[in-house]
């Protein structure tokens, strides 16, 4: 097994993996709506659905992709044909079912795929990767290739504990991290949960984990999911949207020095065992 090491600064687009220790904490909703908020502000944003088990960004956005990355690798279609255009010119690389087998692709096919993805990366400012839950190799691979991770957790003790395990693993790989607390019953509950996790990171990992924001529990989120529309589009003034907009501002403020990210796909290819 190859050693995973976070990507080095090069190129122009910023790549951020959205990850969590525990599943079902709201990663996909955060990825989609953060992507839309950034896109609405004029940032050229690409959303890459890399949750290998549960790829469903397209479902949340009510979009129907025609092709997958499998066809790009096989040469049956181009990367441009796989990309789905969402609102505000948000670009989506849908459910990466083909990507799971990247390590097993014939070298020529893999090269074609990574080349196609690299072309895309050159056209955007920010790439958000919905990278799944847990401390699986896939999650670590995507985060290490990105070099930066947004860790999503809810105030539940199990979510906080699992987030800590993920953070510990990501720190070893040199991944820069931010924290986002989702589904907080109150701001105080969110602050306390964040404080517990930040305290453990400081004490045991000597790590300062910046808090990007606290997203409240908001019934509008579930309503939007059921209508297969992003909550920030359907309910632009709901509490979850307003809180995520604030977090997005902090996210942009915490940007790494220019020059991170290009080569993400190449690193990913390497990490997947080339
Ligand atoms: N802030 C929130 N308020 C209320 N419900 C939420 C919130 N965030 C997420 N949810 C609910 O949690 C469910 C899981 O969210 P999802 O984004 O699919 O999580 P993950 O991608 O981490 O598995 C969604 O269907 C949604 O109904
Ligand atoms: Mg998900």
Image (cartoon, helix red, strand yellow):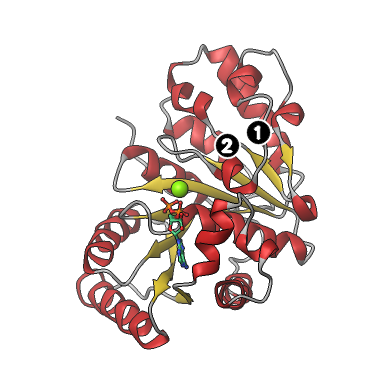
Q: Quadrant of residue 254?
A: bottom right
In the image, 15 versus 184, the foreground residue is 184
At label 2, counting other C-alpha atoms closer than 10 Å, the crowd grade (few under 14, some 14-19, many 20 or more) is many
At label 1, counting other C-alpha atoms closer than 10 Å, the crowd grade (few under 14, some 14-19, many 20 or more) is many
Q: CA distance from mark 1 to mark 2?
A: 6 Å
Of marks 1 and 2, which one's residue comes earlier in the chain? 1
Q: Residue at x 23, y 74 (%)?
A: 200
Q: Disc 1 designates what residue?
A: 117
Residue 93 percent location from the top left of the image = 64, 38
Q: Residue at x 56, y 20 (%)?
A: 110
CB atoms at circles 1 and 2 under 8 Å apart? yes
Ligand 1 located in image quadrant: bottom left
Q: Residue at x 60, y 68 (%)?
A: 255
Q: Which mark is residue 265?
A: 2
Q: Residue at x 79, y 63 (%)?
A: 42
Left or right, residue 201 beside residue 88:
left
């Amino acid at each position: 097994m190859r050693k995973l090491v976070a990507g080095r600064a090069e190129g122009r687009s910023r790549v951020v993996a959205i990850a969590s220790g525990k599943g079902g904490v709201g990663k996909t909703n955060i990825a989609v709506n953060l992507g839309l908020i950034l896109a609405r502000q004029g940032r050229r944003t690409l959303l890459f659905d890399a949750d290998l088990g549960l790829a469903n960004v397209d479902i949340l956005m009510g979009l129907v992709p025609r092709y997958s990355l499998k066809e790009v690798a096989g040469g049956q279609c181009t990367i441009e044909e796989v990309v789905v255009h969402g609102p505000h010119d948000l670009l989506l690389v849908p459910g990466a079912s083909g990507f799971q087998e990247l390590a097993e692709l014939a070298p020529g096919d893999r090269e074609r795929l990574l080349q196609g993805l690299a072309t895309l990366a050159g056209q955007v400012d920010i790439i958000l990767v919905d990278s799944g839950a847990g401390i699986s190799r896939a999650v670590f691979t995507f985060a290490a290739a990105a070099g930066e991770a947004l860790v999503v957790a809810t105030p539940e003790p199990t979510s906080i504990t699992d987030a800590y395990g993920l953070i510990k693993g990501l720190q070893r790989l040199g991944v820069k991290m931010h924290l986002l607390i989702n589904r907080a019953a109150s701001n105080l509950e969110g602050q306390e949960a964040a404080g517990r996790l930040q305290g453990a990171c400081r004490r045991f990992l000597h790590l300062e984990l910046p808090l990007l924001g606290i997203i409240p529990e908001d019934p509008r989120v579930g309503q939007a999911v059921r209508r297969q529309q992003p909550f920030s589009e359907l309910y632009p003034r709901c509490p979850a949207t307003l809180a995520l907009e604030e977090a997005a501002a902090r996210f942009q403020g915490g940007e790494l020095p220019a020059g991170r990210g290009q080569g993400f796909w190449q690193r990913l290819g390497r990490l997947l065992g080339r």
